[in-house]
Amino acid sequence: MLRIVVTGGGGQLATAIERCAKNSPNNYHITHRAELDICSEDSVAEALEGADIVVNCAAYTNVEAAEDNIAEARAVNRDGVRNIATICHERGIKLIHISTDFVFGGDTERTTPYREEDATSPLNIYGATKAEGEAEALGVDAIVLRTSWLYAPWGKNFVATILRRATEGAELRVVDDQRGTPTSALGLAEAIVTIIDSGAWQRMQGIYHYSDLGECSWYEFACEILRQRGIEARITPCKSSDWPSKAQRPHYSVLDKSRILKIDVVALKSWQERLSEVLNYNE
């Protein structure tokens, strides 16, 4: 039986992994910051005692706040990854590190999905620090899983916000000039557990892209959320320039999934189908 340590307990993805791994033959140990603070070398060293695999879901993910808190974002997204990678390398532990589509975006003319080998070009501090974290993870025998537009049946996310504001009767204005792929944390968690439990992790190394299938704008995503929920609401598209923001965001950040499909253990579904699963999720 493998012992898998998952960081970022309480977050969308770590919670999804905990629930997806309930029937696993392996031991998934979900850690919260009080037990494993990735910014502390001593905490990492102690918490990873006896681990076979680490899944690093911990991250500074507040894109707006990162613009004003560069040191804090870097401490988590770069230095924290370095701490984990160092211990993993010393002890022969496999690292699975979660990253983001926001490492891309600088190619303002892009209209085709990004491949793993494409050069990173982040537009904001969050994306830049996540790219730095990738470099730390790839310095050891790690798997880097990039994903995009993550949401879950719990926590703060776009789906929850749209549903809340719509039921409150608010008029919704959603940007329609940023395209990407919404990704269910349940689907990503299922993929991670499958990669581990099947043993596929032993033949995987480097960067892999995982998101649900298809693409849309945030406006189209919002419309589909409301349609599937059967909610009529006032919703209008707007441009990014109409929405005040400190952090610049990619106009296009769809990820090419060809490489992870070659592993032949991960099942991908359309973002619309995954959305339905989340909206109808029951524990």
Image (cartoon, rainbow, N blue to C red):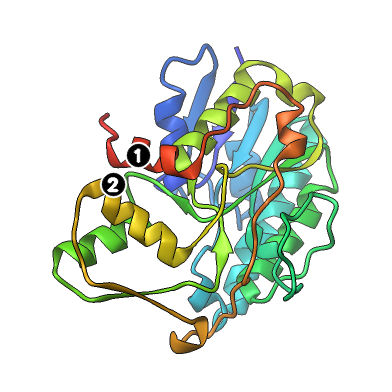
Instruction: Report crowding for label 2: few under 14, some 14 to 19, many 20 or more residues within 10 A (C-alpha).
Output: few
Query: Residue drawn at (78%, 51%), measured in percent from left and top?
Result: 115
The picture quadrant where one finds residue 89 is top right
Residue 239 falls left or right of residue 110: left
Residue 217: image location, x then y, percent: 50, 64
Residue in front for this viewpoint, 175 or 104: 175
Note whether 101 is above or below 272 in the view shown. Answer: below
Residue 276 got which mark? Answer: 1
The total of numbered circles placed on residues is 2
Residue 204 seen by the camera: yes
Q: Quadrant of the C terminus?
A: top left
Instruction: Please state the horizontal and vertical placement of residue 17, each as a whole percent of the image.
Output: 47, 33
Q: Which amino acid type is marked by label 1?
A: Ser
2 or 1: tag closer to the N-terminus: 2
The kind of secondary structure element at disc 2 is: helix
* Residue at (67% x, 61% y) in the render: 130
Q: CA distance from mark 2 to mark 1?
A: 7 Å
Picture quadrant where residue 76 is located? bottom right
Where 52 falls versus 205 (above or below)? above
Toward which corner of the image does residue 107 lie, by quadrant? bottom right
The spot of residue 177 in percent (x, y) is 54, 74
Q: Position of residue 121 (x, y in %)?
A: 77, 70
Question: Dot 2 corresponds to which residue?
Answer: 228
Q: Is residue 120 above or below residue 171?
A: above
Residue for point 77% across, 32% down: 91
Task: Assess whether mark 1 and mark 2 are in contact (beta carbons under 8 angstroms).
Answer: yes
Report the amino acid beneath label 2: Gln
- Residue 253 or 41: which is nearer the viewer? 253
Q: Quadrant of the N terminus?
A: top right
